[in-house]
Amino acid sequence: MASVVITFRIMPQNTSIDLSNLEAEAKKEIVEFCNSQEFKISIEPIAFGLKALNIIFVMDESKGSTEELEKRISHIEGVESVEVTDVRRAIG
């Protein structure tokens, strides 16, 4: 099976949430879900000081849907929402 590159946008509940803690917890959930060790993290300014955490990771296509992973990440304290913003099949 091929690998897919997935981008999650994680929105914190408010501007006082520590994004580094959210990043660590989300990465832990991703590793448990699909054993991914490849990540790219970026912070995206949204509005009025609110910032989103974007996590790009690679997972095996055979794992199927990310719905269960999204639910697990949405239960992390301080997370308002989790959204898949991009899914691409990896080449090579």
Image (cartoon, grey):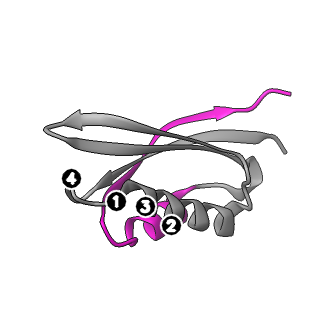
The reply to whether the C-beta atoms of the residues labelled 1 and 3 are less than 8 Å apart is yes
Locate the N terminus and report the quarter of the image it occupies: top right
Mark with earlier residue (3, 4):
4
Residue 11 screen position, x and y as percent: 31, 51
Q: Along the line of sight, which residue is nearer the eye, 87 or 57?
A: 57
The reply to whether the C-beta atoms of the residues labelled 4 and 1 are less than 8 Å apart is no
Q: Which residues are magenta?
A: 66-92
The reply to whether the C-beta atoms of the residues labelled 3 and 2 are less than 8 Å apart is yes
Cα–Cα span, label 4 and label 1 = 8 Å
SS for tag 2?
helix
The residue at which mark 2 appears reads as: 25
Left or right, 81 with reference to 49? right
The residue type indicated by label 1 comes to: Asp
The residue at which mark 1 appears reads as: 18
SS for tag 1?
loop
SS for tag 4?
loop
Q: Residues within 10 Å of mark 1 (few under 14, many from 20)?
A: few
Residue 45 screen position, x and y as percent: 29, 34
Left or right, 2 with reference to 75? right
The residue at which mark 3 appears reads as: 22
Q: Which mark is residue 15?
A: 4
Cα–Cα span, label 1 and label 3 = 7 Å
Residue 39 screen position, x and y as percent: 64, 45
Query: Where 85 sits versus 12, above or below?
Result: above
Q: Residues within 10 Å of mark 2 (few under 14, many from 20)?
A: some
Q: Along the line of sight, which residue is nearer the eye, 60 or 54?
A: 54
Cα–Cα span, label 3 and label 2 = 5 Å
